[in-house]
Image (cartoon, rainbow, N blue to C red):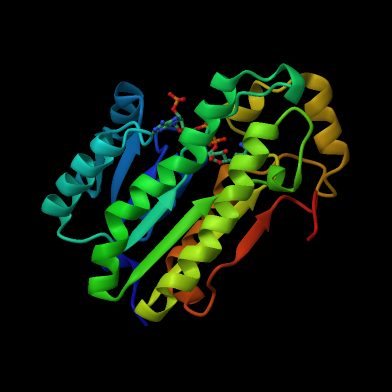
Amino acid sequence: MVYLQSKVAVVTGAAQGIGAAIVERFVAEGVKVAALDVNGDKLRERWQTAGDQVVAFECDVTDGELVKRVFEEIYSRFEKIDILVNNAGITRDAIFHKMTEAQWHSVMDVNLTSMFHTCQAVIPAMRKQEYGKIVNISSVSSWGNAGQANYSASKAGVLGFTKTLAKENGGKNITVNAIAPGQIDTEMTKDLPENIQMMALMLTPAGRLGDTSEVASVARFLASDDSSFVNGECIQVNGGFLMV
Ligand code: NDP
């Protein structure tokens, strides 16, 4: 059994919400974390008391050249990356016939194309070291959600991307899995109209929003050797909202 303690992880969108909860969980297990977020001030403020176990990197993951430079810096500082959690995500909701091209592209860029950049930055080294755990944050919206054609398409794209990388790299002791959270209590869901929030609660057998720590627990599982024979999978964390 290989323990998480000796591992190095990169988590994107780590200044708040689900990403921050995943960093917290990793830190508790002794993982060294490179925490990335587009908002450098918020990120540094969030992790300033974490000591040298968390290093903050301001990074817009839609910028391929910047991602390359930041990952080079992470490799020179930590010498390896064992775990990558692709968590950064945004919504730009609109009913499809009123959706702008800018809304479409911004969501695709942050939620899906970012994973192209980050995975390209780690997979060659993971294949060489014959070890890697990649966890991609998808969404229950992958199965369709009115007002979220862009978001649903990006998150369903994450699932196809995840399964493909799992097939390509499974022979090199690399697992690539996804998590599809339902309604989780974060800044992202606070912005939703009250009627939408009420409807989601009514359709969730648990009768409550999920906590970020409940997603982090599953990320921890998929990032550890406890899930060594789980590959190309998507784990739902939605309180029973959707059962597939
Ligand atoms: P939050 O908005 O609370 O946090 C997301 C973080 O990602 C923010 O700090 C945000 O910065 C950052 N971010 C945004 N764009 C970029 C970028 N280009 N580069 C780097 N960082 C960026 O979201 P959640 O914690 O709620 O969501 C985390 C993930 O979980 C997302 O992928 C989301 O789609 C997914 N998810 C969330 C659900 C929920 O109910 N909360 C349900 C299903 C899936 P800033 O605030 O400055 O934009």
Residue 153 rendering spot, x and y as whole percentages = 64, 41
| Residue 48, position as x, y percentages in the image | 26, 32
Q: Is residue 186 left or right of residue 227?
A: right
The quadrant the C terminus occupies is bottom right
Q: Is residue 133 visible?
A: yes
In this view, 11 is above or below 191: below
Is 58 left or right of 12, judged from the image as shown? left
Quarter placement of the N terminus:
bottom left
Q: Residue at x 83, y 29 (%)?
A: 198
Residue drawn at x 74%, y 25% as measured from the top left: 96
Check the image and report above or below for 1 versus 103: below
- Is 132 drawn above or below residue 48 in the view shown? below
Q: Residue at x 47, y 57 (%)?
A: 135
Is residue 132 rendered to the left or right of residue 238?
A: left
Q: In this figure, what is the number of numbered marks?
A: 0
Question: Position of 181 compared to 1: left or right?
Answer: right
Residue at the location (70% across, 39% down)? 183
Q: Nearer the viewer, residue 24 or 230?
A: 230
Q: Position of residue 212 (x, y in %)?
A: 57, 43
Residue 145 is situated, as x and y percent measured from the top left of the image, at 77, 37
Q: Nearer the viewer, residue 89 or 115?
A: 115
Q: Say if residue 31 shows up in the picture.
A: no
7 or 60, nearer to the observer? 60
* Above or below for 45 versus 69: above
**Which residue ends up furthest to the left in the rendered image?**
76
Where is residue 94, by image quadrant? top right
Q: Nearer the viewer, residue 68 or 230?
A: 68
**Residue 173 falls in image quadrant:** bottom left
